[in-house]
Amino acid sequence: MLNPDTKEAYELFHNGILALSRAEQQGFRVDVDYVLSQKKHLTRRIGRLERKFKDSNFYKHWEHVMKKADINSNQKLGHYIYNVKKIKPAKLTTTGKGSTDEEALKQLNIPELNDLLDIRKLKKVRDTYLDAFHREQVDGYIHPFFNLHLVKTYRSSSDSPNFQNIPKRDEEAMSLCRRALYPRPEHQLMEIDYSGLEVRIAACYHKDPTMLKYLNDPCSDMHTDMAKQIFMLDKIDKSIAGHDTLRQAAKNGFVFPEFYGDYYKNCAENMACNWGKLPHGTWKKDQGIEIDYIDKMFKPYYLSNHLISKGIKSYDAFVEHVRVIEQDFWGKRFKVYAKWKDRWWEEYKQKGYIHTYTGFTCSGIMSKNDCINYPVQGAAFHCLLWSLIKIDQVIQKEHWDTQIIGQIHDSIILDVNPNELKKVWQTIHYITCEDLPGTWKWICVPLEVDAEICEVDTSWNTKTKYKE
DNA sequence: GGAACTCGCCAC
DNA sequence: AAACGTGGCGAGTTCC
């Protein structure tokens, strides 16, 4: 089912897997002593938390009513909460049972369950990441595999261990895991990522003029514009305390989900929950992001107060507000993009397959969302893969000491010799932002990369922005 | 005792 | 009318 359709596509994957195999061979250095001692430390912490949880009234009731309680079984927990105690689940799983994930448990407002969530988080770090680093390391290096034959969008995957899902957002989990990973002695880790790659590649397909304008004008920013509209603010700049949070809220709560095919009800619910800090379906004053204008600096001023003052007086009113914004988003702002989505879907329904710009075919049973997402996701990754191959060729040809050690869909991770840093950056910047768009003529938007770097001999949890 | 499943959760 | 895309992996559970 996974087949390259053209010679170019075949060669991309052929050369890609060879370049990736060199990254696999190189490997990522692991501090085994740290891993072993941190695992022990986490086990003690988890033990303390488990004793505390088992001492709680919630657990004692659970044990009493069910005769046996099991701290590790979400299934038993769900059965006790939803079937025995008859609490109405805030959320269901795909098979229709009451969910026991973090979001669902938080809705229950049972403080003892927060300990359970802490236990889960620490176990994830210990059992998924640190355990795998220890299990998979050979002479102090892990050698994650990168596959090109498993993903239906023609992206890559990684395993043994998976290099592509090491914690990053949660500060504590990030630090606990990434403190285990080092460059070779006297080297430094560097990560170079394409910014907004999927959005840019999508634009190459639909060529929406509004989107092209956003991408060509460095002063404009669609996420800030959407934040203004969603949160009903005249401006979002440094005068508003939460300006970056508001932008993030619009980006992750509305813009990206909409691009992936989500719709206004989910977006509104998630935004109220995540950024309004409100339980599902509720709406009240003094909640959410502090937006704190300068003229009100002595009194915290919250997002929900602001929206209420603008006439959004209930949860339902907020949902309706987001519905209207969605209508404007696809009907006016990005209407050419919307038309492309319809055309693309019609084409699939007629032919039974679609092509990526990079010469691959997506066929089989696909939903409308699949049709729209697959060619974007695949071609975006292929930009990264093409760049990685080119960089690897230079490394081989010029006998650099610097090596590629991995790839995460739109970024490349290198183990850099400090003496080569400048040429590494210049070469990669040229290949990614000039050579690639010069070679693949369908790329009709500018491409940009950002870089982050760690000091020499420091672990992967200490990245800072790289400046030339 | 292993295969296949569900669920939760990490990344892009 | 329908309603978030792609993976890997650990633990628990069920089935054979």
Image (cartoon, coloured by chain):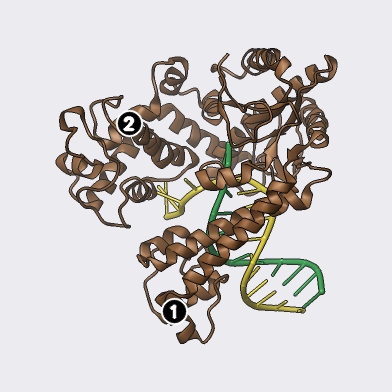
Chain colours: A brown, B green, C yellow
Residue drawn at the location 55% of the way across and 48% of the way down: A173
- In the image, A372 versus A126, the foreground residue is A126
In the displayed structure image, the side of residue A294 where residue A257 appears, left or right: right
Quadrant of image for the N terminus of chain A: top right
Badge 1 element: helix
Amino acid marked by disc 2? His
- Residue that carries the numbered disc 2 in the rendered image: A243
Residue drawn at the location 74% of the way across and 47% of the way down: A32
Residue drawn at the location 21% of the way across and 40% of the way down: A300
Disc 1 + disc 2, Cβ < 8 Å: no
Q: Position of residue A233 (x, y in %)?
A: 24, 31
Image quarter for residue A356? Answer: top right
Category of crowding for the residue at label 2, using alpha-carbon neighbours closer than 10 angstroms: few (below 14), some (14–19), many (at least 20): many
Q: Chain of mark 2?
A: A
Q: Position of residue A406 (x, y in %)?
A: 71, 34
Does residue A382 lie above or below A53 as drawn? above
Image quarter for residue A431? Answer: top right
Q: Chain of mark 1?
A: A
**Which circle marks residue A83 in the picture?**
1
Asked if marks 1 and 2 fall on the same chain, the answer is: yes
